[in-house]
Image (tube, rainbow, N blue to C red):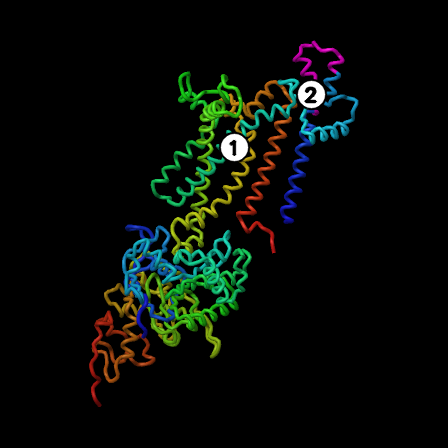
Amino acid sequence: MAEPLIEIKNLNVDYGLGDDAVHAVSDVTLTLHRGEVLGLAGESGSGKSTLAYGMTRLLPPPGVVAGGEVIYHDPERGPYDVLSLTNNELRDFRWAETSIVFQGAMNSLNPVHRIGSQLTDVIRAHDPRSSKEARLARARELLTLVGIPSDRLDSYPHQLSGGMRQRVMIGMALALEPKVVIMDEPTTALDVVMQRQILGELVQLRERLGFSVLFITHDLSLLVEFSDRIAIMYGGRIVEQAPAKEIYTDSYHPYSAGLLGSFPALRGPKRELTGIPGSPPHPGFREYQTLVMCRAGSEFSRKGAVPCRRLYSKVEPGGPAGHADRVRFPPAVPEILRAVRAGPPGARCARCSRRFGQRGGLLAAPRPLTRVSTLEEIRWKPLPRR
Amino acid sequence: MSYLLRRIVFYVFTAWAAITINFFLPRLMPGDPVQALIAKEQGQLSTDAVHSLYVLFGLDKQQPLWQQYVDYWGQLLHGDLGLSFTFFPTPVSEVISSSLPWTLILVGVTTVCSFMLGTGLGVLAGWRRGSWVDLVLPVTTFISSVPYFWFGLIMIELLAGPNSFFPSSGGYDPGVVPGWDIDFIGSAVQHSLLPALTILISSMSGWILSMRNMMVTVSSEDYITVAHAKGLSDRRVMLSYAARNALLPNVSGFALSLGLIVGGTLLVEIVFSFPGVGFQLFQAVGAKDYPLMQGIFLIITLSVLAANFIADLAYLVLDPRTRKEG
């Protein structure tokens, strides 16, 4: 794996202070590597956007970053914590290192300024010594880059279509050649054809310019196609992260499975689409890190997903079995499962059941996991010779 | 441009309608100015004099109404608004033009100052909401609910007096001869300080409130977050992104208040006996001076129309979305 570019460590974001605070993002640890497209998926209210705003310190009040670190590995200056930058340093950091394409393409541009002035003011803010001609030339170049005729520089936002506006925003995001572009549901407001087109261009641009992308969406099918790795968020936590292919073919977490089961495949046999019953739990509960499938007490029958009641009561026998809402789900479980399964050849997990690595064994028998709750606790021992 | 043309046509039509109503209004009222003048002279007028007065006022009964209307337009285009009763036989246009500069300068300067100061403070209060600047709010809300004239009376009571620097009435010292010299201008400025302060304080709070509220609304727009994310300086985001957009509703309010400059501060001028148009109108009403009232109404109407037109133009310049171009 390439070297890390942004390391989010134990990030907590609350809305509000004190006991009434809603923990919108809790204890998220996530790494974005150089040149990678990291997808961040999850349903509405799972904390995806809050995570993005939190790590860039753009949270509107009453949002507060309650703890954690966001380490940016600057190629020139070495690693530093974005959360502890002073205001001036933060201003310099923004857009030059990390730019953002926001959710609302329609409202991201100021309606009373020309496209040109909105493209050039960011260049001027970061490089006050640049000449006006140079800035205009760069703005023209950026428009061409995203497939908009450069004479549109004199247009106002209302004279552009939604797709064009989003292209302008993407062009603007690339203005200072940042190392990271955060895309917060950049194509949600557009129709699917336009989505495809813009994302296709984005992939090309990324290959040419080599920036990393943190792509936030609830459209998992899109992510499977465009991203290298996918992290799934649920209730303010990362519940699973793995290479995109792996998530698609073999997701561990019942929520990921639920997400994947909710859209149709283009080829292959027809199957019933499964939705996720109930509505997401209130993020105010610490305990709620339970699961989708638990929320309606329903059972889920798909590969990799088991009735959560069984799963949880076994994963953490300490939890009050049978009381779905109060069962805890250790965030490390999917990683443990994955590690155990991909364990070194000729060895088996010392405290895991033998059946564990078997295909079709599902997660149905993770009993040994009761003794392993973090990756570090896994011990390997050689398989007995025949 | 066709948009502008349509607006101009609209304003020309409105002006015509206003002038026409202005023509008919006194003619619909019982009695006529000559009767009033006869009453004023207590019957000391001969029939010839009365007749010539009728001719003078354009009220000779022989003429059909449409003929009078055409003549009225003819006179109007020559700047002839008839003769004032109170200042008989001074033409109304002369009476108005002697009081108009007083009002224009006093109320004009204070309106512009109050708009600029109020908007500036409103920008700050909206941008730094939640800080100590919010203390401005209850104060301005209180002040904006106080009527102008009452505030003026309080000012006179507190600040003006026999030995005070601030004179309590008039436009200039009676001992000074009007003219463009230091003495006169100094005296005029000194006399206008209190009324100006009254208008400034009581009208500024409205600007502060509306600007602050618009700033708060605009601050939550996506493009403000984008501007922050772009790493622009706080000052630039505040002025060029937030205030620039929040200003739009205030600008049209400002243009409308420009229209009210001429007649709007009647009560303040009365309280301070300031020789402006408002005070003139007050005197005209007291003396049943119809031609003068008519003339002042006409000026007020035209200035409101002109201000509306300016508001339209300002909007065209400030908000590209209102421009109807390809």
Q: Where residue A157 sits in the image (x, y, percent)?
A: 52, 56
- B291 or B126, which is in the foreground? B291
- Mark 2 is on which residue type? Pro
- Mark 1 is on which residue type? Gly
Which label sits on residue B310?
none
Q: Where residue B135 sits in the image (x, y, percent)?
A: 36, 37
Magenta stretch bounds:
B27-50
> Which mark is first along the chain, 2 or 1?
2
- Residue receiving disc 1: B108
Q: Which residue lies furthest to the bottom in this view?
A: A386
Q: Residue at x 29, y 72 (%)?
A: A335
> How far, Cα to Cα, is label 1 from label 2?
37 Å
Query: Dot 2: few (<14), some (14–19), or many (≥20) neighbours within 10 Å?
Result: few
Q: What element carries label 1?
A: helix
* As drawn, B321 above or below B154: below
Number of residue marks: 2
- Residue receiving disc 2: B30
Q: Where residue B121 sits in the image (x, y, percent)?
A: 41, 39
Q: Which residue is drawn at 45% across and 26% down?
A: B193
Q: Mark 2 lies on which chain?
A: B
